[in-house]
Image: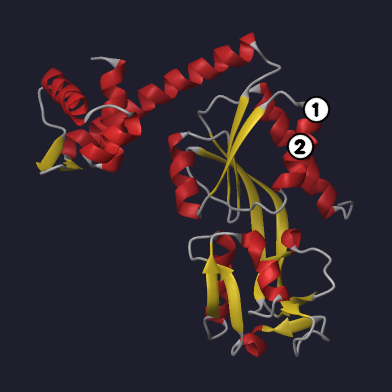
Amino acid sequence: MELLQLQYFIAVARLEHVTEAARSLHVTQSSLSKTIQRLEEDLGVPLFDRVGRKLRLNEFGSKFLRRAERALFELEQGKQEISDLSSPEHGTLELAVTAASALPYILREFRKNRPDVQFYVQMLTTQEMVTLLHRGEVDFCLSSPSIHGDDINTQIVFFDPVLVAVPKSHRLAGQDSVSLAELRDEWFVGVKRGYGTRDLTDSVCQSAGFLPKYVYEGDEPARLGSLVEAEIGIAFIPSTASNANDHIHYLHVEGHELVREIALLSHKSRYISRAAQEFREVVVEYFAAMAAGEK
């Protein structure tokens, strides 16, 4: 059994499509199909049920996938550990975030001490982030909500109140707080379902007897402030994402616990490099200072 066979098998198993898997691996379909066929011959069983170019993992394939992913995961961890030992000043951080508002400030602080470390950040939905986390494909996730699991380290770093942002011309702009009942007939701008803050606010509003009416749903939380300012709608915005703006007024929500948890997540078996350890320290210190009112 060859390492290449495992890599090809995992790609096909995740996509369940020969053409898409071949494209992602930058190989020909015939080469990919032959490699999978040799793997099945080595194992003595078929791993997929085939319908044209569409493949579906069968019982053998599902069980073997877990083992194959684990094997490649351990090899990748060994590679990272050796790289860290041989060149501790350099390295790469793989990050996934659903709570991105504080990330620019955290990365700025981190880069002051580790300017040679490269980092790659993905803004994802909660489910997308959980998939990468369980596979061990990221060093850390900065997430809201917090995620728990047998293979996940979960460290809650901040409790972040969710505010209501309205334009200064809005009827509620003269108030410091608002009840959810007063928002029943408002039009909202927000992110799509699947993002932590959206799922939290929808759930809390539903408990108050209504679901917010959205005139805009997107993938960029940072855009919501400009849409509120343009009087397109009002928005639920976490306090960490709010900023002083002459055209926006923020209100606290009365009578409901509208607070999101921000958590730092990692896979328990993933090797934590020196750079990753330092990143974790920066995150914890940043939110500790925020909780103390220093940010």
Say left or right for 22 vs 124. Answer: left
Q: Amino acid at mark 1?
A: Asn
The answer to whether residue 277 is visible is yes
The answer to whether residue 150 is visible is no
**Secondary structure category for the residue under label 1:** helix
Quarter assignment of residue 134: top left
Quickly name the residue at label 2: 282
Quarter assignment of residue 31: top left
Circle 2 Cα neighbour tier, 10 Å, few/some/many (<14 / 14–19 / ≥20): some
In the rendered image, the vertical position of residue 244 relative to residue 7, given as above or below? below
Tell me the residue at 16%/40% (across/down).
58
Residues tagged 1 and 2 counted as in contact (Cβ below 8 A): yes
Tell me the residue at 11%/41% (across/down).
50
How far across and how far down the image is residue 287, in percent? 77, 48
Which disc is residue 113 wearing? 1
In the rendered image, the vertical position of residue 238 relative to residue 97, given as above or below? below
Sequence-wise, which precedes: disc 1 or disc 2? 1
Q: Amino acid at mark 2?
A: Val
Q: CA distance from mark 1 to mark 2?
A: 10 Å
Frontmost residue, 278 versus 249: 249
